[in-house]
Image: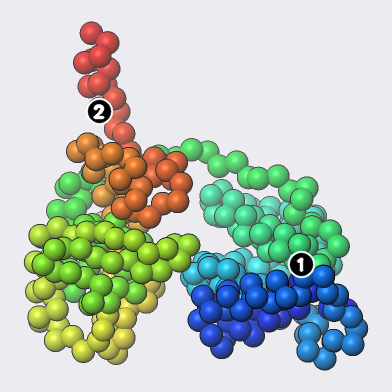
Amino acid sequence: MCDSVDQFICAMKTRLVTMVEPDTARDIIEVMVYELNGYDLTKSTTEIVPCYNDNEQIIKSYLACLIVEGRTKSTAYQYKRTAMKMFDFLGGKKYDMVTSRDIMVWLASLKLSGVKSVTIKNQRSNICAFFSWLHSNGFIDKNPCEPIKPIKVPYEEKQEFTSDEIDTIRSNCEDDYERALIEFMYASGMRIEEISNVRLEDVDFKSMIVKVRGGKGSKDRTTFITPVARKYLIQYLKNEKHRSEYLFTSKYNTNYTPGGLRVTTRKLSAKCGFLIHPHRFRRTLASDLARKGMPIQEIQKLLGHSNISTTRDYVNVHTSAVEASYRQYAS
């Protein structure tokens, strides 16, 4: 029976997320939590408290809670996708019947099918967060993820684009849109989900400042573009005859989705002969700025990282640079 205050709050989050903005929903939930303090919801309240008896409904409630608590829709989607994959593998086994062994067998199946260790690590993290939520909200008596240890991933230095690769990408752009997108990604260091949501009003072309609204963790910040990026953006906007409030607009006069923007980079990858992942531009900007002497704390703020260790992971220090410093200081 769904007779706890926590489950009632989860049910309200599920309803509120489809009715009001996340910020408003959070305010309402905070008031409810305060007012319900000291109360118990008994069986007589079950008419207004939905009981979750299947995986689809419980996942829906979980995602609603994530969004109300400030997670982005794209992040919530990743959690949903992970949970659905696991349940599909387990043949639709009900969430409160899933065991630690079930989860470990599922993770092992990913490994055997050739999925990368870092992806499996993320899948484990997502599913553990889901079952932790189920446990903390009283939907299950025991968290089956507790015995499952974190997955170790061998360190692999992720590469940024070289200057030659950047030149190759630029020379293979077919139209104003592709060139403007490439220059904007390279100059701003924004995440692809953030770029999808940039509106024209967010870009100050005179001062070359861009407002990033609702970034990761629902945080706003400021980033910048270069004169080169501004040049191609203005050229794109002029020739495309924009009829949308968004910076990058599809043929349907709506903003490009992150998936739509990735289609462009995949097409360029095929022409250039190497992987052009949007996140590599972000990493490239961080490394370029660090090599030119920009303090790591300022790069962290520019990229919108909550933890500076993440920024350090983005910044590549090449062996040649290490050797040069060694020769300078050790001689």
Going 66% across and 59% down the picture, which residue do you hit? 129
Say whether residue 77 is left or right of residue 100: left
Estimate the spatial distance between the alpha carbons at disc 1 and disc 2, rounded to whole Å: 51 Å
Which numbered mark, 1 or 2, is in the foreground of this view? 1
Residue 259 seen in this snapshot: yes
Residue 313 placement: quadrant: top left
Going 19% across and 38% down the picture, which residue do you hit? 292
Number of on-image labels: 2
248 and 164: which one is in front? 248
Residue 137 got which mark?
1
**Amino acid found under the numbered disc labelled 1:** Asn
25 and 114: which one is in front? 25
Q: Residue at label 2?
A: 321
Image vertical order of residue 172 relative to residue 200, above or below? above
Q: Would you call the spot at circle 2 few (<14 residues within 10 Å), some (14-19), or many (20 or more)? A: few
Q: Nearer the N terminus, badge 1 or badge 2?
A: 1
Under circle 2, the secondary element is helix
Q: Position of residue 283 (x, y in %)?
A: 32, 49
Under circle 1, the secondary element is loop
Q: Are marks 1 and 2 in contact (CB under 8 Å)?
A: no
Say whether residue 53 is left or right of residue 271: right
